[in-house]
Image (cartoon, grey):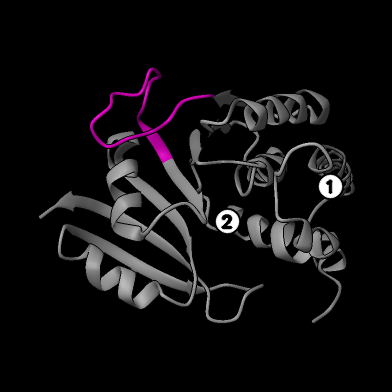
Amino acid sequence: MSDPRDRLAGRVSRETLERLDAYAALLRKWNRRINLVARSTVDDLWRRHILDSAQFANHAPPHLQRWVDIGSGAGLPGLIVAICLRETHPAARVSLVEKDERKAAFLAEAIASLDIDADVLCFRLAPQIQPPFEANFDVVSARALAPLAELLALAAPLLAPGGLCILAKGRNSAAEIEEAVRHWRMNLISVDSETERDSVILKVEGLQRV
C-alpha cells in the first residue's frame, strides 16, 4: 500500500493537508498524557486513523448542513471529517459527542487550534435519555463504538428526516447486520474500507424500528 499521507495529499488541498498534519502532531502530544488511541497504533497513525477516518467524508451528502459523530474519542472520524468538509462542504458543521471530559478537552483544543467549524458535546448518549442538544442531524457517524443494533438505537433519535448513518464495521459486520435487521428496517449499502481488509463502511437510510 502506498504511503497513506501521500494518498490523502493527492486528494485534498494543501491547507487541508496542513490541518491534518497539525491534528496528527496534537494527537501525539496529548496521547502521551491520556489514552486517545492505542499507543501501538501511533506509528501507523495516518493509515490506521487519519486515512481510515477521512473516507467517511467521501460519503457526505451534497446538501449537508449538520453532522454528528458519536463516541468521538480522539475525533475519529469526527475531527478528520470536519477538516475535510471545510474544503468540500464549507457550510456544514460537525458536532462531536464524547462522554469523557479529558477527551472532550482534547477535542475542544483541536477545534480551536485547527480553526474548523465544529463543537464538542460532552454527554453520555443512551437510547432512553433525551440529549441536551438539538437533534435533526443530516449524518450520524461512529467508528469502533458499539455493535450495529446498539449504534442504530443511539443514532435514530438524532437523525433528521431522510438522514444518513455512516458507520465503520470490521470482520463481524455480516453477523451484526443479521442481528440488527431483527430490530430495524433500513436501506443499507456496504462499501469496502480502503484501509482495513475485511472492514466496511455501512451507509444506512430509512431507519425504522421493526
Q: Give the dominant element type of the magenta stretch: helix, strand or loop.
A: loop
For the point 57% across and 56% down, the residue is: 56
Q: Nearer the viewer, residue 99 or 8?
A: 99
Q: Percent position (x, y) of residue 136?
A: 35, 30
Magenta residue span: 122-138
CA gap, disc 2 and disc 1: 18 Å
Q: Earlier in the sequence, mark 2 or mark 1?
A: 1
User: Would residue 51 be visible to someone looking at this image?
Assistant: yes
Name the residue tied to disc 2.
56
Is 170 one of the magenta-colored residues?
no
Q: How crowded is the residue under tag 1: few (<14 C-alpha within 10 Å), some, or many (20+)?
A: some
9 over 78 or under it: above or below:
below
Question: If the image is split into quadrants, where does the N terminus sit?
Answer: bottom right
Of tags 2 and 1, the one toward the viewer is: 1
Q: Percent position (x, y) of residue 191?
A: 48, 72
Relative placement, left or right, of 28 versus 61 is: right
User: Would residue 11 be visible to someone looking at this image?
Assistant: no
Q: Nearer the viewer, residue 131 or 164?
A: 131
What secondary structure is found at the residue carrying circle 1?
helix
For the point 27% across and 63% down, the residue is: 187
Name the residue tied to disc 1.
24
Relative placement, left or right, of 182 versus 27 is: left
